[in-house]
Image (cartoon, rainbow, N blue to C red):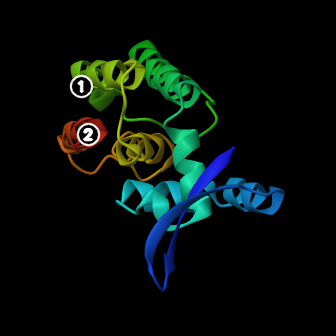
């Protein structure tokens, strides 16, 4: 996989393409959670090789399909009702069932063949993985809808 590196030279900035080495790929995989959070918060994927590699992975069709399946599975689990001795953090079933239209819209955006914003995909990843996200945390009744709408908007590519 190649990575774009922006470099500053005395005669002006330019872009070079370089192959990322095994240490960079390993470091990227090891720190993917921190990189996802940084990208979700708006960090530029061009600011480091690790962010660039992670951004390429996040916007890939395979990652987007996986995230869509995870959302679908979460919806199904919420609709089934509580299971005894279920591993993991308990989900907010009522909020997830109530947010079905927004979750379906999010899945549609992820599965669309067009480009998506890396920040938006990273926000989906964080929403699904962070145990304090509105999917899991029972703080406010409307916080999931707000988070989903912000994530949907973040997926839109702005020119």
| Looking at the image, residue 12 lies above or below residue 140 | below
- Disc 1 versus disc 2: distance between alpha carbons? 9 Å
| Looking at the image, residue 145 lies above or below residue 104 | below
Secondary structure found at label 1: helix
Which quadrant of the figure contains the N terminus? top right
Q: Quadrant of residue 60?
A: top right
What residue is pinned by disc 2? 144
Which quadrant of the figure contains the C terminus? top left
Does residue 21 show up?
Answer: yes
User: Residue at 33% of width from left, 45% of height from top?
Assistant: 134
Query: Where residue 28 sits: x, y (%)?
Result: 67, 57
**Along the viewing direction, whichever of 87 and 154 lies nearer the viewer:** 154
Query: Where residue 81 sits: x, y (%)?
Result: 43, 18
Asked if marks 1 and 2 touch (Cβ < 8 Å), the reply is yes
Query: Where residue 66 sits: x, y (%)?
Result: 56, 25
What residue is pinned by disc 1? 102
| Looking at the image, residue 156 lies above or below residue 17 | above
| Looking at the image, residue 153 lies above or below residue 19 | above
Q: Is 146 on the left or on the right of 65, as rendered? A: left
């Amino acid at each position: 996989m190649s990575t774009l590196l922006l470099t500053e030279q005395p005669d002006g900035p330019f872009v070079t393409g370089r192959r990322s080495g095994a240490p960079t790929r390993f470091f990227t995989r090891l720190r993917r959670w921190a990189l996802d959070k940084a990208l979700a918060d708006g960090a530029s994927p061009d600011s480091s090789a690790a962010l660039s590699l992670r951004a390429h992975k996040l916007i890939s069709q395979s990652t987007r399909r996986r995230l869509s399946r995870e959302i679908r599975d979460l919806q199904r689990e919420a609709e089934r009702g509580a299971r005894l001795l279920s591993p993991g953090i308990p989900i907010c079933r009522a909020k997830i069932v109530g947010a079905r239209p927004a979750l379906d819209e999010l899945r549609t955006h992820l599965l669309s063949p067009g480009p998506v914003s890396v920040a938006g995909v990273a926000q989906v990843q964080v929403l699904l993985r962070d145990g304090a996200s509105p999917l899991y945390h029972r703080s406010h009744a409307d916080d999931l809808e707000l988070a989903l709408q912000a994530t949907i908007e973040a997926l839109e590519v702005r020119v």
